[in-house]
Amino acid sequence: MNTRLKNRICLGLMSGLTCFIIISSPNPAYAMHIAEGFLPVTWAIFWWIVTIPFLIFGFKSLSHITQKNPELKLLLALSGAFGFVLSALKIPSVTGSCSHPTGTGLGAILFGPSVMSVLGSLVLLFQAVLLAHGGLTTLGANAFSMAIVGPWVAFVVYSLIIRSGKQKLAIFLGATSGNLATYMVTSIQLAIVFPAVEGGVMASFIKFSGIFAITQIPLAISEGFLTVLVWNWLQSYAINELQTLKLLKIQEG
């Protein structure tokens, strides 16, 4: 199979998966991430305090990458745009939050999880301000789940699986795991604030995560496949950037 045919098949599959995710997202949807004002003030402040150190470290990592390799800025922008578009495709799941792809796994695999803490938080900020998707008071909590925990899990899973030499499997499992980890954390955040009358936090967590799972598991798998397709596309059109990041060298080995 020649390269041109492979690229066309790759683009066709990317379009098909994107259409599936969009069609699977009914409109309108009024509950996105954890909505504005949904968390008590103390918990909103708590998640901001937890998130800020990761953001500081992320800004340092981002600054280091852009100064050392300015040619990677376009790929950084692509990673942020990928996260923005995918995480804007929401499916209402429970009151106060929703299900959707996160798109943070790709950037975590390319640049590391600390960079995605910044890019993911910027995505959440723009969505809160421009799309009423999430909120400013809940930005710390949403950033912790989607821009910190999700990318770290994606990066760790990718780093473990890549040792087997199966890079595309590592990318698929990394992106899928990062997505699911985001919603596990969101479920914990909501369960802590809204414990069940009978069973407390654990019962509430089982309820939130169970409802999320109905829509989130197929979405996470779809995101994994889409991330692999984007990777295939990058292998054709961003060879120099991937070599700079020393990712192609691993695949060739």
Image (tube, rainbow, N blue to C red):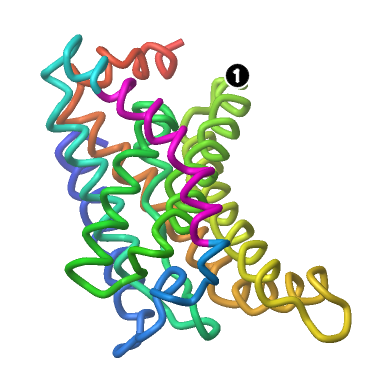
Tell me residue 140's x, y (percent): 44, 54
Outermost residue toward the front? 42
Tell me residue 57's x, y (percent): 40, 25
**Residue range corresponding to the magenta coloring:** 44-62
- The image quarter containing residue 203 is bottom right
- The answer to whether residue 180 is magenta is no
Relative side of 172 to 59, left or right: right
- What residue appears at the point 40 percent right and 14 percent down from the top-left corner? 252
Question: Which residue corresponds to mark 1?
Answer: 163
Q: Which three-letter amino acid code belongs to the residue tagged 1?
A: Arg
Relative side of 13 to 8, left or right: right
- What residue appears at the point 21 percent right and 52 percent down from the top-left corner? 11
* Front in this rendered view, residue 143 or 160: 143
Helix, strand or loop: magenta stretch: helix
- The image quarter containing residue 211 is bottom right
Q: Say above or below: 120 vs 67.
A: below
* Front in this rendered view, residue 109 or 5: 109
